[in-house]
Image (tube, coloured by chain):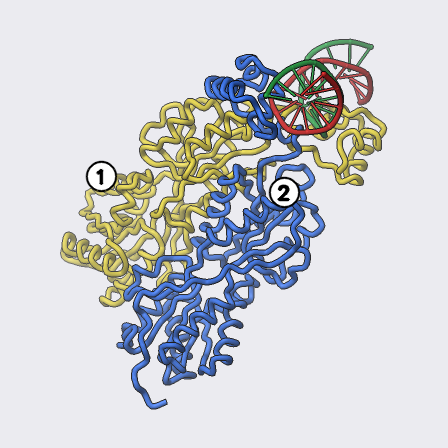
Chain colours: A blue, B yellow, C red, D green
Amino acid sequence: MANIHDVAKAAGVSISTVSYALSGKRSIGEETRKRIQDAVRELGYRPNAGARMLAGTKTHIFAVTAPLHADTYAPAHMAFVLAVTQAARSFDYDVLLLTEDEATAGLQRVAASRLADGIIVLDVAKDDERAQMLRSIGLPSTVIGIPDDTHGLVCVDLDFRQAAELSLTRLAEHGHRSIGMLGHPPRIYERGSNFPHRFRSGFVDAADELGVRSAVALPGHGPAGVRAALDELYAQLPDMTGLVMNCEEPIQTSALDELADRGVTVPDDLSVVSACSSFDTSRFAPPLDVIPLVAADSCVRGVELLVQQLTAEIDPHIELVPPRYIERGSVATVRAVAS
Amino acid sequence: MANIHDVAKAAGVSISTVSYALSGKRSIGEETRKRIQDAVRELGYRPNAGARMLAGTKTHIFAVTAPLHADTYAPAHMAFVLAVTQAARSFDYDVLLLTEDEATAGLQRVAASRLADGIIVLDVAKDDERAQMLRSIGLPSTVIGIPDDTHGLVCVDLDFRQAAELSLTRLAEHGHRSIGMLGHPPRIYERGSNFPHRFRSGFVDAADELGVRSAVALPGHGPAGVRAALDELYAQLPDMTGLVMNCEEPIQTSALDELADRGVTVPDDLSVVSACSSFDTSRFAPPLDVIPLVAADSCVRGVELLVQQLTAEIDPHIELVPPRYIERGSVATVRAVAS
DNA sequence: CTGAAAGCGCTTACAG
DNA sequence: CTGAAAGCGCTTACAG
C-alpha cells in the first residue's frame, strides 16, 4: 500500500507538501497540487488512519452511544443511528458504535484511548448516567434528546412540547373542543426516555391554555390494550371529536382498525393527528395528518454542533427543532354539535 | 492523559516491559507485573489507539457494513448489528459502522486507510457488490448470509433450508399432509436478500421429499394482503391442516388475527409453526412453536471466524448454524379427516 | 526476565 | 510557495 513518501516521490515534492496539499492547510502552487493529485490517484493513496491519529491528534471518528433496551422501538432507533452515521460521513467522520452494555465504560474507554474526537449520545433518558459521564470526560459531545439535567451539555431534539401544542392548535382551529391523546404504553414513560414525557406534558398544558377538554390514555399490550385505551378516552370524553396519537406504528394501526370496527369514520366522526411519528402515515387508511419526527433533522444538527465544538468553544445549550405539520386530510372542521 | 512513559517511570521499568506486560506477549516477573498493573490503574492509563494502530499494524476495530433499504425489517436488522457489536467487544474489538450509501466505497476506504482489521458483512444479497469487493480488498472478512457466489468467502448463517425442512418434518410427524407456507411479501424476494429464497426452496423441496401436499403464498401489503394470501392457501389446499409462517412479526400477527376471525382455532383446526422468526412468539395468541432466528448465533460465530483469520489462514467456506425447534403448543396431532 | 532503540506514517512548527 | 526534521505513543525485533 502506498504511503506518503511514495506519493511525494512520484510528485517530486516533499512529504510535507503532500500532507498540506491533502489537508488544504496551506496554499499550494497550482502546478504542484495537480502533480500531487495525480500521484495520489495513480497510487490509490489514502493516509494511514493510525498515523493520522497519532500525529494529528484527530481521529476523524465519532463515537455514537445508542442504548437499545427491550422497549426501544427498533425502527425509530435504527433511523437515528443511520441518520447520525450519514451526517457524520458528510463531514468525513466515521462512526464507532457503542452499545448499552458498556454505556459509560465505553465512553471512558474511547475517551482515554483517544479513539474518537467526539461523542453523540442517542435516546438519552431523563436520568441518564451517560450525561453525567460526558461532563467528566472532556471530549466534545452532543446529546440527541433532553435529559432532566442539561447542565453543561449541548442538546438537540425535536420540540416535542411544541409539537403537542401544534397538533392541539390545529384541531382547535377546526373547532374541536374535546380532544383525546393516545400515548405510548406506560412502561415507556417509566423507563425514562425523555421525549414521551415532554410530549404528554406539552399536550396537557396546551389543552389547558386553549381551554380544550382533554384526556390522555396509555395503551396496554396488543390490540386489546389499544381498545381499552380508546374506551378510556371515550369514557372521559363522550363528546370527543379529536384524537392526537403519539405512539409507535403498530399502536396507531391498531387504533385506526379499532375505530373502523366501531364505525367511527376519520375524519367525519373523529379528526386524527399523528404526532412525532417516524414512520410513513400516508399509507394508513385513511392517511393521517402528521407532525413527522425526522431523525435526520436532529442528527444533522447534532453532528454539526459536534463538528463546531472541535474547532471552537461552544456554550452548552439546548436546541429545539421546530415541528412541522403535514396535512393529509384526517382533520376536518367539527360538525355542529351541542356543546 | 498518562502515556506509556509515565507508566514505565511510575513502575520503575522500561516502556517495552510495560507494553509486553499489557499485551501478554512475553512473560513478566510476578513482582514487576504487579508494579505495572498498579501504575496503570493509578494513572488511569489506556494505550493511545492511534499509536497502537501505527506501531502494531492492528487497529482493534472491525468494520460492519449493514445495508438498510426501505424493505429491511428494522428490528431484525438492528438485532444483527447489536449482536455483531457485542460479539466484537467480547474479543476487545470496536465496531465501525458502514452504511449502505457508501457500501463498497466504505470498504475500500477502511481497507486502504487501515482503519479496520477485518470486515463483517451483514444481510448480504444474492448478488451483492460487497461480496465481490471483499475478494479484492485483501482484508479478513466474514459474511453473515449466503450470497449466490460464495467463492473465496467465509460465510455464516442459520440453515434456512434445514429450518424449512424441520418445520415440515414436525408437522408431518403429527400427521399433517397438507401444509401451507405464508412467506414474505413478494418484493422481499425480488430485492435479493438471500435467506427468504433459501427458506422457500427448502420448503418446496422438503414437501416433495416428505410427500406432503403444499402451497406457498406471499402476502401483499397490510392486513388485506395477508387475508388474500390465506385465501390463496385455502384455495390451493382446501384440506390444509398445517401452516408454516416465514415472515415478519406484523404479518404473523395479522395472520393469527385473521384466522381467529374466520373461526379457525390454533392448533385444533390448524397447526402453526413460526419459522426463522427473530421476535418473541410466546406472547402471541396463541403462543407459537418457533424455529428462532437468533442473531447472536450467527454473529458470534462470524466474529469468531474473523478473529481467527487475523492469526491464521482460514480456507473459504460456508458454515450453517443448525436450526432449533421450540415447542409452544401450536402444533397438534391432525384430527381424523378423510384424506 | 528485562532494556535500549528503531520505526510505524503521518502532522506541524520552524526555516527559508 | 516549499522542505527538512522533530515528534506523536506505541510495538517489536535485537541484545543481553
Q: Which mark is residue A302?
A: none
Tell me the element at label 1. helix
- Where residue B129 sits, quadrant-wise, is top left
Mark 1 and mark 2 in contact (Cβ < 8 Å)? no
Dot 2 alpha-carbon crowd within 10 angstroms: few under 14, some 14 to 19, many 20 or more: some
Residue identified by numbered label 2: A310
Q: Are marks 2 and 1 on the same chain?
A: no
Judge whether residue A272 can be spotted in this image: yes
Q: Is residue B167 left or right of residue D16?
A: left
Q: CA distance from mark 2 to mark 1?
A: 64 Å
Circle 2 or circle 1, nearest the eye: 2
Image quarter of the C terminus of chain A: bottom left
Tell me the element at label 2. helix
The residue at 61%/28% (across/down) is A26
The residue at 19%/43% (across/down) is B211
Q: Is residue A261 left or right of residue B287?
A: left
Q: Position of residue A16 (x, y in %)?
A: 63, 21
Residue identified by numbered label 1: B209
The residue at 49%/62% (across/down) is A322
Indicate the amino acid at tag 2.
Answer: Leu
Judge whether residue A187 can be spotted in this image: no
Q: Is residue A292 left or right of residue D10?
A: left
**Quick one: A310 or B78, which is closer to the camera?**
A310
The residue at 44%/40% (across/down) is B99
